[in-house]
Amino acid sequence: MKIRRTGRILVYGLFKRKKMIIGLNVGILGTILLGSLLWPPSYEAESTIIVRGRNYETPLFQGPQREGPWTVLMNAKDEINSEIEVIRSRPVLERTVLALELHKPRTYEDKGFFGAIRGRLRDVWKSVVYSLEGLGLVKEPSGHESVEKAVESLERRLKTEPTIESQIIRIRYREVDPVMASRVVNRVVTEYLQQHLNINVNRAESSFYAEQIKTLEKELDDVQAQLVDLKTRTGIVSFEDQTKSLLEKLNTFDVARTTIQKELISRRSKVEKIRHLREMNPSLLIPLPEIGEDIQIQDLENKLINLRYEMETVSDRYTESSRQVVTVRRQVDELERQIKNHVTVLLERDMAELSKLEAEEQALTQTIEALKHELETLPLKEMAIVNLTQKVKAKEDVLSVMRRKYQESLVAQASDYRVQNAKVVSEASAPLKPVVPNLPLNLVLGLFLSIITSMSLAFLLDYWDDSLRMPEDVEQALGLRVLFSVPEL
């Protein structure tokens, strides 16, 4: 009886205050609706980049205390977090702000009836700010302060987060202008890639060649000075007939050895580069463009291109599990395997040629050493001239090779393949729909809020209402028995 009486009282109290409940619901929903319509829409642009793990056989930053090959390993999670910090670093954000002039006032088109109202409100706010600045109550920010505020705003609104179970980083940015939102995201990605290369690019190789060139130039100057001084003191200009033939042979073998050494350097660099590229990217079919000039490789590559085109056509028409798609995919895998095998054969051929050149170099070295031993029987002055002349020639050849390698390292420095582990998966495009405000969601949440608020207020008022409203209240408060009651008309 008590539970039924309490429930009846609660229902009676709700119906008694139904106008307040309805009015409060309508007011809250109207406020939320008006606020959602007047709230400036924000568009979110998104771009994704992939950060592949690095595994280097040689260090990116060489030190004098380290000798021999060694490996740099980095945990994938730590590398993702490190790259996120690079994305949100001050240089990246500041260059983005300056490139897109985010620190300067901007205007954008706000369409529709409520867009016009929002425009009027913005104009009113600008007038208030200008008035306060004119009165000296608000300080107009300087150029540096404007840049600092724009950088802080960009850092606050830029969202960077890793994708679960992957090496993908998502970069999001919200802006009232959809085109500007996409431009900001793409610019941040561009500046990040540049900063990534600035941090990781290998400059040790070019520095090594530069130091070696300076050392060789100094040594060459010293040897040339010794040769000039010796010829001046001895007065010897040319060798006699008995040494002419021997010196010609020595010169011929020395030139041949230098030529083989150049070929060895070039071929060894090619083999090591192919190996390194295949280790860094096992899925790479043709490591170097010159390998692609092989007739058989070209034929297999053309077939692979045709099959991949056929694969795209078949995939559009059939499902992934269909027999046509599976057959074409199997053919693509087989062609890729054939290309890799043929590249391996070419690599083994180059290695055999490298061994042959090394044997020739060793034989030439032994021959040159024998000729030098024969020259030791000549007068000491002539022998000194010969040795100095050979040193000058050898150092000039090595210096020429070093200068060429130095130029090649400078070219490769701009795009070091060992550190380009960050790639853009998808660029940001201008979004078509705003992410906020979400009118249906706001109305649903506002409906729940208004119902909870109005019901709570009604129950609270009913709780504090101590008037006698029901017969049970009279019996409980006065202790009198109710014989009958007259309903309210």
Image (cartoon, helix red, strand yellow):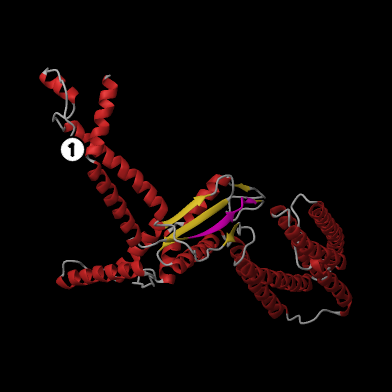
- The overriding secondary structure of the stretch rendered in magenta is strand
Tell me if residue 429 can be seen.
yes
Q: What element does badge 1 sit on?
A: loop
Identify the amino acid type marked 1: Leu
Where residue 114 appears, as percent x and y from the top left, is 34, 66
Pointer 1: residues within 10 angstroms few (<14), some, or many (20+)?
A: few
Residue 41: quadrant of the picture? bottom left
Q: Report the magenta residues as a range.
A: 45-55
In reply to whether residue 321 is colored magenta, the answer given is no
Where residue 136 appears, as percent x and y from the top left, is 16, 69
Quick check: 256 left or right of 273?
right
Q: Nearer the viewer, residue 107 or 112?
A: 112
Residue that badge 1 annotates: 489
Tell me if residue 61 can be seen.
no
Q: Is residue 14 above or below residue 65?
A: above
Q: Nearer the viewer, residue 468 or 460?
A: 468
At horizontal 29% and vertical 50% (from top left) the residue drawn is 26
Q: Which of 131 and 190 is in front in this view?
A: 131
